[in-house]
Amino acid sequence: MTVAEHERLPEVTERNPSLEAKLHAMWESAPGLRGWLSTVDHKEIGVLYLVTAFGFLVAGGIEAVFMRLQLSGPNQHLLTPEQYNQLFSMHGNTMIFWYAFPVLSGFSNYFWPLLLGARDMAFPRLNAFSYWVFLASGIFVYCSFLIGAAPNDGWFNYPPYGSREFNPGPNIDFYLLGLIFFGISLTAGGINFVVTTLRARCPGMSVNRFPIVIWGTLSANAAGLLAVPTVSAACLMLWLDRNFGTHFFNAANGGQPLLWQHLFWMFAHPWVYMIVLPAMGIVSDALPVFCRRPLVGYTAVALSTVVTMMIGFGLWVHHMFATGLPVLGMSFFAATSILISLPSGVQLFSWLATIWTGRPVFTTAFYFFAGFIVLFVIGGVSGFVTGSVPVDWQLTDTYWVVAHIHYVLIGINLFPVVGAIYFWFPKITGRMLDERLGKLNFWVMFIGFNLGFFPMHFTGLMGMPRRIYTYPAGLGWTTLNVITTVGSFILAIGILLFFINVLISLRRGAIAGPNPWDAPSLEWSVPSPPPPYNFAVIPSVASRHPLWEERLQEADGTSVLDRGLVLDHHHETLAVTAMDGEPDLILKMPSESYVPISLTLCISALFAGLISHWWWLAAAGTVVGIGVAIAWLWPLPEAGQREAPADV
Amino acid sequence: MDRNRRAEKASSRPDEKTGTSAQLQKLDRATGRISLAVFFLLSASAPARADAPMAYTVGFGARNFPVVNLLWALLIVSLLVILIVTGLVIAGVLRPRDVPRSTDPRLVPLERPERGLAWIYIGTAISAAVLVGAAIWTFSTLAAVSGPPRDAKVKIHVIGHQWWWEVRYDSDDTSRIFTTANEIHIPAGEPVRVELSSVDVIHSFWVPQLSGKTDLIPGQRNDTWIEADRPGTYRGQCGEYCGLQHAHMALAVISEQPAQFQSWWTHQLEGPPASQTETVAAGETNFIAKCGICHAVRGTTAGGRLGPDLSHLMTRQTIAAGTLPNTPGYLSGWIADPQHIKPGNLMPLLDLSGAQLAAIRQFLENLK
Amino acid sequence: MSDVFPYRPPLPMGSIGLRSSGFWGMAFLVLSEASLFAYLFFSYFYFSVQPHPGPWPPSGPPDLSYALGQTATALIGCGTMWWADRSAAVADRSGLLLGLGASLALVVAFIVLQFLDWYAKPFSLATDPYGSLYFTTTGVHLGHVVAGLIMMAAVLLWSLLGYFGPVRHAPVTITAFYWYFVAVIWLAVFFTLYITPYLA
């Protein structure tokens, strides 16, 4: 048959050692530091994300330790009010922005191409770029500590307290510019995940065969594309108010402080679903492995993931119930806030059914996932109670809400994340984490967390407001605060045990084969750790559980993992049609490049110039950055981006 | 009595079982934690205790009764949900299976049992029913407490400052309008309309045992109402982060019999008693010179509006927005160094000699 | 299906038209940027429905002369970009270059008109909330226009270097698509800032 110049009849072959060697040489990164700075390998980027996110977790945890010490008794003077305010603000910012979402991006980055049967993400350089910008934006905000001017208006940063008049230093500017900076990473990552899911999959990977973590991360990243711009807009507006005298939020000149709250929460409410839905997806995929049965109600769970995210856009006013808005409007948002419990509930019942009708296997990962379910419910009901407007008028801005947010953040993000590490560590490193230490890790974390945070429900009911650096004796708050401080320290020890387990097992963990858990999805069909090219031949799938389908006997066809498209002319993977997963195009990918980190440095110069008002630096960063961006987008013949390719 | 026995019974359950496996420890912990929860909740339901003045699990007044009931209902539902789901998780994990328990998935066979979806259907149906009930109760409570049950005869205007409360009593008779600070008196058994605004940042007016929060937002006028059904003192605190001394921005609402309330109002309109001693007179002069820029005292020429109105200061129980008791010692200490107790607040360190400080204090102590 | 390799026909390779990853990436970037403008318009309308001491806009409905010119350049630019893309697809090199050149000139004209409009305003960024909203919204849009200008310049350079042919000219298609987006957003800005004051 005639093959046009821009087409190719791709070869199909069996997996074989010489092919693997050829692909290995083609795909592996440069050694050492050079390799890390120029990598576009999604697995290395995933590891960078995970390690960096855990670094921010530790930073946020240290901030919390100081806070808890200050609050461990009435009228203490360990911290000045300004120090406490900076610490609680940065604790929130660090955990909610620089830990909670990037850690999930780390898993998604590492595993998506493996789960979807691809060799890499759709945009490898954009992938690296989104990591470097995440790191740079975190460093940017933390530089504020070096001059004692960290953001001090909470993670929600309300004006007028955030305006120049009441906050003359650069503290708030670090927050505003830092979030805009971070937003670049989120948008880049969001585009990458969405396009990868829609395009870079293996044949047969139709949408109803996605692992649930794909649904969760896809929903989260698609939502991010729509939600992040509003916080960028709000931050731009407040930055202009503070630096150029605009009047968006200053009431004296007709500005509207409440507009900030609308814009911020229109971002931040979807955001809180973005930081839990991927983690819930991980549980939906990994829990069934340890229950020895497929997830109950896959379709219901996948749909309710998407529906939860969508409804999540319609809830934001429940953060503003006390601001004097009309009752009718608030009632609508109370209704949606109560309604969203339903799709979340669907996932809960699915997990319960999977455990109940399955055969539990008592691994550490399973403990984390089972424990997560209890924490999920506690976090969920404490949120449900605040959805009731008149009750929220009491609960809001008290420690009840602090209890709620920690149950949903630690319970629905951190616990599944740690469980996911226990699950996927063998795949990433080729070694098993120690199970005995793991079980100890779980119990210390679980007990410490509940001891620390369950009493906060009562502290809240006893009327202790949030964001206060001290409190008087005699209000009934002291004992509860002491218990919380003790519990939080135990939780910190638990997290320390986790790090110890990781460090020990990296050196001395038992060697794991490709599939130590006998799990069903594609990442377990490759060696541990995976080779740089992931799959020697592109697999084809015929069911949701390629590695289980023979035993379950429920697929119409057979997944074929040992034979498939070779795609070894360059860095290549397959693009498929969006819904059905039929082969559509051979995607040609760039290999390693210093462009992503270079552009990040230019953007860092831009933001450094903006915060310090060194406009020449900002301009230089912009101009050089434009040059780097053009170099990035320069059409490459080997990527098939312009005519006369070097080799077909 | 009853609740202690119940708590004991709950925590004694694990002793009946044998076995020391980690799974049973899980049950033990969960039960222990839950019984602790029950104990705390039930003990919080006692009538307002002096050691829990900010707890809103109890309420006094027409605005709070429906909310407290709804709160308790939601708490009980929540607790039941937690208990049921935790029970299902534990039972689901521990119940006997046809194959021995293992820590290695490769040793446990795969299967896809047909049943399972029923969980989702039944669970969602029950949840929906509960949620709809909660929503309906919420809306009816909201309707009940949004506006006062009858027209409020007393209207006050609360203006938020960093970090104190300006309170202005309105009246159709302009001679009866006056301003005070940080302590609000209301007549018991009557609704009081409260208008809220702010001169600087966002604050929130919150007296937990009388009403939920309403924000004070600059450029915006919010309206709320409170009512106390019986005389008493109710503590409040700013409920929206407002800067350095957000932690020390408390207020007190004192409800009195209507007759007492009226006589308090009339007394507030008067000026201070004529100075009787030289020290008090000297204190007044010093006060006007050093403090009058920011503070006002009715009946003197001190008319500053930047700080709290200090007329009849001695009728108040606390100073510095509920931070310190109103005693001579604390008052002296506060004036001598406001930054020590409330660092960052807007009252500067004044350069006062010992004599000046004593004179000013005596003048203030005369403001009965 | 027993045969899991149904792809008897050959597969295209690399970045080709609407199947290129670059196009998909641009499509989602456009979605995100469009929502940014939606939030800016939300802010504008939020302010416009507040009680005002005077009229809204404070200096009266804005003068339309420059804005109409900008609308014209934006829409004609869509036409010239479409023509450039079509020329690339039929290997018409001169059409491609002329189309890109004309688009570039129109974009420059748009930017000049925007600056003239700004200069002629009786208020500034810091006068009042309306001024802040006006300059921020049109300024953010102008930023996107400048990005389009840079893209067109790069694509023109690559076209001059002969990189594009009838099959592989994805950057032209993608840049044209981006410009359509910028033009549509301009129509929304025009309607919100310039037309709605006349309708009120």
Image (spheres, coloured by chain):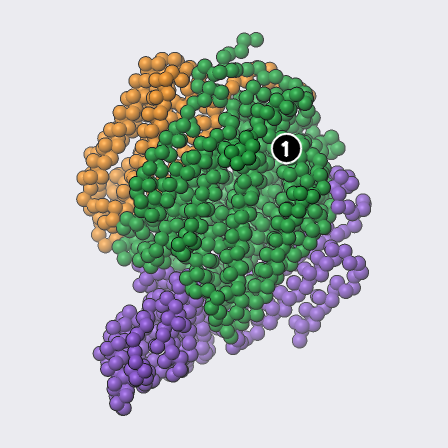
Chain colours: A green, B purple, C orange
Q: Residue visible at 39% across and 13% down?
A: C90
Q: Residue visible at 28% across and 36% down?
A: C190
Q: Residue visible at 64% across and 50% down?
A: A500
Q: In this view, does C193 lie above or below B244?
A: above
SS class of the residue under badge 1? loop
In the image, residue B107 lies at what x, y percent? Answer: 78, 40
Q: Is residue B235 above or below residue A331?
A: below
Question: In this image, A505 relative to C153: left or right?
Answer: right
In the image, residue A292 lies at what x, y percent? Answer: 72, 41
Question: In this image, B206 relative to B23: left or right?
Answer: left
Looking at this view, is C114 or B229 the one in front? C114
Q: Say which quarter of the image contains residue A216.
A: top right
Question: In this image, A473 relative to C7: left or right?
Answer: left
**The furthest residue to the top:** A1
Q: Mark 1 points at which residue?
A: A530
Q: How many labels does the image show?
A: 1
> Mark 1 falls within which chain?
A
Q: Say which quarter of the image contains residue A517.
A: top right
Looking at this view, is A117 or A254 the one in front? A117
In the image, residue A286 lies at what x, y percent? Answer: 65, 42
